[in-house]
Image (tube, rainbow, N blue to C red):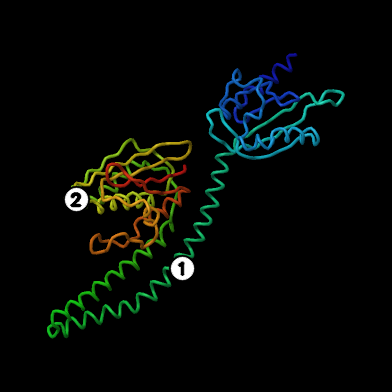
Amino acid sequence: MTSDYHYKQMIDSIEDYAIILLDAAGHIQSWNKGAEQIKGWSASEIIGTHFRTFYAEEDRNRRLPETYLTEAAALGHVQHEGWRMRHDGSLFWGHVTITALRDETGVITGFCKVTYDRTDRLRREEMDRRMRELEARNKEMEQFAYVASHDLSEPLNTVGSFTSLLQADYGAQLDDTGRAYLSLVQTSVGRMKELITALLHYARIGRYRSLDRIDTAATLRAVMTDMHQTIVASAARISYDHLPVIYAYPTEFGILLQNLLSNAIKFTPPGVTPKIHITATPKGSTWYFCVSDNGIGVKEEDREKIFIMFKRLHSADKYEGSGIGLAYAKKIVEMHNGTIWMEHNAPSGTRVCFTINT
């Protein structure tokens, strides 16, 4: 009896594994601390209910829990992995082992179900997989960018040099129309150089990355210091709620904030003071960041297009820039295994939101 009591005490105290005893029909008979911690129910709430409670509706409709008991009875034990339900309705990735328990005559008296929460490990594996894919894509992009920049820069430099010579040697002989044409060519050459530089910078994002623990509020303040002249010139008002400490790529996360702030300031109607507010909300291991502004806004049908490289909704004459800032942002967010999107910010402006998985 003492041995059984100590054994039960040991099982009840284990916190990393949910160890549950079921009767022969699958009803819960015991509930340790690990089960309460992983699944969220207390013993008084769950004992006596059927263990199908832990499975999603689709799995219950397929009678998956009952199938596992049948297999465990036939084979002695069964192992499987999948999404399981917590008390609050959230899901976790569980590794489950169900072992059939028999009496001295071989009759099944119940089952022992052991569950281990592998959600964090699954996320790390998924992030590692995504990072390998991104590294391969980055390498291809970088190679393309170097080749393209070289092939484009050579003739572009030639055009730039000759337009400068033309301006120096024959500028005085040109009429107003000729000088206007020459100025247009020079402007276009400068614009093309900016695009090539932007392409190279895009390709190099994350090249020397290093994941670290960062204070995002401190990162935002550093970005605002770097943007001091732009902020002062526009009289922009930038505010933020409590921002978290997270694991991220410090340099890239700073570039992300800088691009979002720059866009918010740039696309503000004339005569309007830019007002920008940054928030961060946790949900599990994911942080939801939003940068809200009072700018000119973006039509709903254009909100996905703006994350495409060099996609512009306005002419460069009206709003200067390379048209790559939000493509930068999208690439950096994807480095963090997150997503980015744009919403309407009532009564006017936009709200760019993105997730960072930590």
Q: How many numbered marks appear? A: 2
Which of 87 and 20 lies nearest the eye of the viewer?
87
Quadrant where the N terminus sits is: top right
Which of 322 and 178 lies nearest the eye of the viewer?
178
Which residue is rendered at x = 28% and y = 60% of the image?
314
Q: Amino acid at mark 1?
A: Gln
Residue 3 sits in which quadrant? top right
Say which label, 2 or 1, has the lower sequence index: 1
| Residue 205: percent from left, percent from top | 41, 58
Structural distance between the alpha carbons of marks 2 and 1: 38 Å
Mark 2 residue element? helix
| Residue 45: percent from left, percent from top | 59, 20
Which residue is rendered at x = 78% and y = 23% of the image?
109
Residue on which the image places disc 2: 234
Q: Residues within 10 Å of mark 1 (few under 14, many from 20)?
A: some
Above or below: residue 303 compared with residue 145 = above
Which residue is rendered at x = 57% and y = 43% of the image?
122
| Residue 161: percent from left, percent from top | 26, 80
Q: Residues within 10 Å of mark 2 (few under 14, many from 20)?
A: some
Mark 1 residue element? helix
Residue 5 sits in which quadrant? top right
Above or below: residue 120 compared with residue 307 = above
Which residue is rendered at x = 81% and y = 35% of the image?
74
Disc number lying in front (2 or 1) = 2
Q: Amino acid at mark 2?
A: Ser
Residue on which the image places disc 1: 143
Q: Is residue 186 left or right of residue 245?
A: left
Name, please, the residue furthest toward the top.
1
Above or below: residue 292 compared with residue 154 = above
| Residue 10: percent from left, percent from top | 66, 22
Which disc, if any, is residue 21?
none
